[in-house]
Amino acid sequence: MKKVISIVLNDFVNDSRVLKEATSLASSGYKVTVVALHNDELPEREVLQGIDVHRIKLVSRNWSKMTPIKLLKYLELSIKMIKKYKEIDIIHCNDIGPLPIAYIIKTLTKNKVKIIYDAHEYETEMNGLKGLRKKVVSIIERFLINKVDKVITVSNSIANEYVRLYNIEKPGLVLNCPHYKEISAHDKFREKFLIEKNVKIFLYQGSLTKGRGLELILEVFTTIHKEAVLVVMGYGPLVQTVVSYSEKYSNIFYHEAVSPDVLLQYTSSADIGICLIEDVCLSYRYSLPNKFFEYAMAGLPIITNNLIEVKQIAEKYRCGWVMKEDSPNILKGLVNEIVDMDLEPIKENVKRMTKEYNWENQEKVLLNIYAGVHK
């Protein structure tokens, strides 16, 4: 049985991609451990959906966030991981953070350990990455990407960029799709917020952060007077902004984030999903957000914007509406049109799209990649 560690440099609470990959590997005969960071609110060891999770305690975890101290934290983590995880077969690096640690382990084991680099974004072009930090990340990735055994990423455009930048074999594409399910519509939002049946519910779900179109969406719904409401579900730095809007406007509601196992029940309680990632960095421009696929799996037509990857799918399957530009007037006009539409024909297209874009198909790609790495 091949031993795999999947490393994340977070607390591993709501990382659905990592958990799906781990469970798929485990069901195919791999011994998988997710290795994460510990905090006092979480157990050091637990089992999630049959997957062993080991959160590593750092003496330095609560020290200063100054750069030299961050380097000390990383050094402590590296030493503890190298001591603990030399007797393994494959290291699955989620994002670039764990990559230097994996390379050291591979070197110490004389290349017996294989490395899979899973770039969840366009790592050197992420939102907010700039200056010295961006240069360091770029140097690390350029140096190490030829040392790994396989690269995986999340969209065709990002894969092509990695080929262009580093002259490597095209990365494998494992998209952020949910498991295929035939979801019945629920009414959780109508019941919680007492929303009438004739009112269409527009849903924003996911990270409440800048760069996701949330502020534009909130602004537009302050001007909507037809039978339409906005539900914002998630967590993040903008949660208080959303709460303040919900307190001031009767057609805007905030719902806290829910666990992945019940997420689609809540998603299916809306009528339309909104996915407006802003074109503020190349990572966003080339993105294929998991919420785009979550909306679809829950049966929702989707409002999206003119980004390359989501536009291609939305137009191919006619599963929603593509905004030509991120304009309040365009979004407002579109919402007002949708309120009077019969959505059933579009929902049929959404169902057709999910037959291709689901985790069962992505799992096949993942397992083929692993088979090629350890053959």
Image: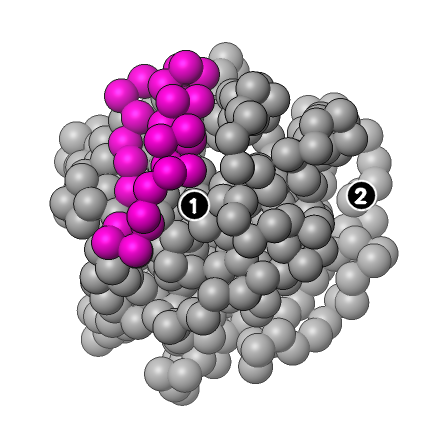
| Tag nearer the camera, 1 or 2 | 1
Can see residue 214?
yes
Is 60 placed left or right of 279 in the picture? Answer: right
Give the spatial CA distance, label 1 vs label 2.
Answer: 45 Å
Label disc, if present, on residue 272 of the rendered structure: 1
Q: Residues within 10 Å of mark 2 (few under 14, many from 20)?
A: some
Q: Which residue is mark 2?
A: 60
Is 14 placed left or right of 68 in the picture? Answer: left
**Residue at figure coordinates x 66%, y 67% from the top left:** 54
**Quadrant location of the N terminus?**
bottom left
Residue 98 at what x, y percent from top left? 51, 48
Range of the magenta residues? 320-347
What is the three-letter code of the residue carrying label 1? Ile
Can see residue 143?
no
Label disc, if present, on residue 372 of the rendered structure: none
**Residue at figure coordinates x 17%, y 30% from the top left:** 164
Q: Is residue 327 magenta?
A: yes
**Residue at figure coordinates x 78%, y 44% from the top left:** 61
Which residue is nearer to you in this view: 280 or 334? 334
